[in-house]
Image (tube, rainbow, N blue to C red):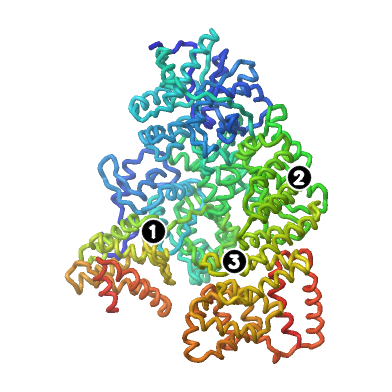
Amino acid sequence: MTTETVLRPAAERQYAAELAALAQADDRPRPPRWRLSPQAVVRYVLGGTLPDGTVITPKYVGDRRLVEIAVGTLVTDRALLLVGVPGTAKSWLSEHLAAAVSGDSTLVVQGTAGTGEEQVRYGWNYARLIAEGPSEAALVPSPVLTAMRTGAVARVEELTRMPAEVQDSFITILSEKALPVPELGLQVQAVPGFTVIATANDRDRGVNQMSSALARRFNTVVLPPPATEDDEVQIVASRAAQLGRALELPAEPPALEEVRRVVRIFRELRNGSTVDGRTQLKRPSGSLSTAEAISVVTSGMALAGHFGDGTITADELASGLQGAVVKDRVSDTAAWQEYLEAVVKERADWRDLYRACQGW
Amino acid sequence: MADLPERVTLLGIRHHGPGSARMVAEALERVQPELVLIEGPPEGDALLDHVPDLVPPVALLLHDEADPSRAAFWPFAEFSPEWRAMVWANTSTVPVRFFDLAAAASLSDDDPTSPATDPASPDEPRRASLDPLGTLAAAAGFDDPERWWEDVVEHHTDPADLAEAVAEAMTALREEFADEVDDRTLRREAAMRRNLRQALKDTDGPIVVVCGAWHVPALRTLPPASADNALLKGLPRRKISGTWVPWSHGKLATASGYGAGIDSPGWYAHLWECAPAADAVPRWFARACTVLRAEDLPASTAGAVEAVRLADTLAALRGRPSPGLSEVMESARAVLCNGDDTPLRLIHTRLVVGERLGEVGENVPTSPLAADLNRLTRRLRLPLNAEPKQIRLDLRKDTDRERSKLLRRLEVLDVPWGTPDTTRSIGTFAEAWQLHWRPEFAVSLATAARHGTTVEAAARQVLTTQAATATRVVEAAETLSRSVGCELPEAVTASRTALDRCAAAATDALELLSALPDLATTVRYGSVRGTDPDLLRVALHGLLTRGAVGLPLACRAIDDDTAERALAAINGAEDATRLAADEDHQETWQQALKALVNMQDAHGLPGGRATRLLWETGVLDSEAVATRLHRATTQAAGATAFVAGFLRGSAALLTADPRLFAVVDDWLTDLAATDFEAALPLLRRAITEFSPAERRMLGDRVKGSTRSTTTETTWDEPLATRLTTHVKALLSTPPPNITQSSDIQDLRPLADSRVP
């Protein structure tokens, strides 16, 4: 199977068994070209147990309502915009929604400052264009065009990083559900099932602010950072374990206590105060997202597996923590040192972490 | 135990539930009863005739005649089932009665300190320690009892057989939680049964009973009357009177602290209004768009279309019969608000809660005082609005002056409908007010009714009583200034007398002085207010003279707290003297300050402040000040206080004024090394009250990095002269619209120093 040969299989491959079981058990009406009914999609994302005993793992831990609004938006063939600070599982949710709805999460346009219109609309195979003149065979469809033809979900990552004029080429696609190709004198009409899931980052809004004409064509769902420490611990622990398996790390998944420690440090620095609210803290410049907490834990696992005894201790976490918190050498170092001295040192059972961090 | 006769129809409802309201309306049409009983206090029966004169939301206000502040409200909205029953009975001319426990009894259970909480009516079970609706909802798999009720009852399309289902569910619940029912509920239900027996005697026709669902099981059987009578024995009797008062949607919302409220009165009203046309959701989004557009936020019709589609899809996805409040709000956020909470809050305040205020017709009996207020608001065109509103009044115009008078008099009566807005600049002739009518003012009005039959008479009565009972100068002075504001000559005279009386008896100079600022303001505005300012100025001078004489002594041998008070009193008195006293008395005040400065054993804080004030007016020269600063540092105890008193609150001045800076600078540089070390902690403590920014400014000034304002600076000489002359001219006669004379005194040395 190919799943074993790639580093990170697409969602519809990794969770093929779950999707198949859901489709099997699903008796509700499905919108045109949907693989699952909307209710089944919600269940796929939030997890649960099917009547036949298949366990569906939760993909997104958080407010059920948000997922329902997202799925509801896709049912009404409106485009969905997921907004949030970095690391709030926007792309993660978008990938799983696409996988569950159309069984294909690979129709992706990655937004960068260099993204051009041909990646959103279509390009040309120039050799053919010159040899044969404009023809459909010379047309190179973008993922969006492919999705329109097949009635699938197209994903747009980091929409606001694209130049504004490229963003605006979505306007016609989203409102008319059609893409004219003037060179061939034809118009590609989207078939039912086509829709777009875009992600955008709150903090980078200023980069290429979306025009209000485009914003109006999206339903917006704001993904918040995990509401409680327990939620976040659950996310970090389960993702770290999955990643550890995927990367074949020799270490065991870390004890919940270590994960909780990392999550607490991240939450406290993010919120600018300790959990008990008694100590005010400097906020580092980085976003300190859940995703970064996950990577601290997995890198700790890698260290422990290859250079340690296979179990994560404070020593393995220290280096990762330092790297995640200190993004700006001067100001963040100050914030981190202050946190170590004022908070970590004072917690009796955190002494090992304090000592480990001092070494760095 | 006798079962209830067939001819009685029990309708278990949820208070303020539009679904229940539909059920009640339908059941009444079907049964065509000859008598309707409604949960509520029987004392309100007489007021039920006025239902046609009312526009909901309104509340029944009942209060104890002997003690009007002991009062309670029973609010009803357009969509309240009880209200529907009243309206139906009224239009079909069928007798209708309240049949709950008498307010005479329920009012005494209630904590008299919180008259605004409703003791008797809605949703009793939800306030008990047990939440029966929550239990039912949880059993049905709902996380939110409101949603459960909405789905099962409010969205129920066929209300006919609903009553029976509700009754059964509640019976099961009551059996399960029999222990949780408190005595008061049992007493109320006994009263309900007693009134029901009476009703059965009075008529042979069908009877419809409208009461909270929780009580239905208790009314299904009638135990022997003697048992109920035993429960109801010995309840207090009192004379209750009442009226209808306008209520607001905001007050119905739980958020305002009304215990049995509902979260979304605006939404329920909307549901009720749209039920006949069955277009609740589209109309809701149309209204949401209107709200957003009114605030210049983009909201397109196309957006509303998409929002309706999303709301419908969400409802289907969640298996609900039709979109509820959470669905419409969620889709409004995703589609109309771009995920932003700020515009969503706007929709919440305007639509979900709403600020509708009810109306009570003229024929409804009210206290003469309330009637007078109504007359006045109509005459002065000041409608009672539930939404806060800013107004500006020009006191030179008659109408505006009358309005200001009314607002001030109401304030005296504990009805703070308007709050004076002091943050905006206010001249002698202009006043800014923030108007916000709250329905609970009705209680204060009822309480004030015993003071008089008109607003004017009641305010006069309250003020003269206050004047007569005043024992302290400050109280008397405050009463005086309020009387002047209310333009009540009798009250002014009475409080003048009270002020003289208190001043004569007062032994504390500080108390006398602290009454001055208030009085000074009154003197300045007195003329606008139709009171002779000279009359007041005489009072001011009297207080000033007495206070000035006592000041030095009052600053001797006192602790630090009293010294703080003395400092505040001196500051206030200084301002007041500049503002309102004549030259003779300004002189008297200066003499008092001099005496204070020369007194060796005075507390440092007032002493330092007096030194500074005298230096500013030029009575003391810089050298004398330096001497005093030196002397202060040599005595260990009072030194900090002296320096603090001297410098308090003048960081900006110290930075900007080279003269003052020089005084302090010279003093510091003259200190011997050992003395300097000794003075350092004092100085440090003296300037701890400066803000960090001020300290930084000061530090820059010392380093010389700020642009100094000394004579080296080049400027256009003639221009500077013209400017300073102008400023001096302004300062020599304080303009009428400057109320804080401290602005002036802070400027004066600055202006002087710029003259080359």
Q: Which mark is residue B674?
A: none
Subunit of mark 3?
A: B
Callout 1 touching callout 3 (CB < 8 Å): no
Instruction: Examine the rendered structure and indicate whether residue A241 appears above or below residue B97.
Output: below
For the residue marked with disc 3, what is the amino acid? Ala
In the drawing, what numbered circle is on residue A92? 1
In the visual, does A103 lie left or right of B386?
left
Instruction: Give the image location of residue A253, x and y in percent.
Output: 23, 62
Residue at the location (38% across, 28% down)? Answer: B181
Near mark 1 (Cα within 10 A), the count class, few <14, some 14-19 or many ≥20, is some
Residue ID at (51%, 11%): B200
Question: Is B487 in front, or is B386?
Answer: B487
Asked if the residue at tag 3 contacts the one at tag 2, i.e. Cβ–Cβ closer than 8 Å, the answer is no
Picture coordinates of residue A146, whole percent (x, y): 46, 57
Crowd class of label 3 (few under 14; some 14 to 19; many from 20; radius 10 Å): many
Upstream in sequence: badge 2 or badge 3: 2
Q: Chain of mark 1?
A: A
Q: In the rendered structure, which amino acid carries the disc numbered 1? A: Trp
**Which chain does tag 2 point to?**
B
User: In front: A256, or A243?
Assistant: A256
Q: Give the alpha-carbon distance from disc 2 to disc 3, as whole Å.
A: 34 Å
| Residue placed under numbered mark 2 in the picture | B490
Asked which secondary structure carries label 2, the reply is helix
Q: Is residue A256 left or right of residue B487?
A: left
**Disc number for residue B554:** 3
Please state which of residues A39 and B203 is positioned toward the viewer in this rendering.
B203
Classify mark 3: helix, strand or loop: helix
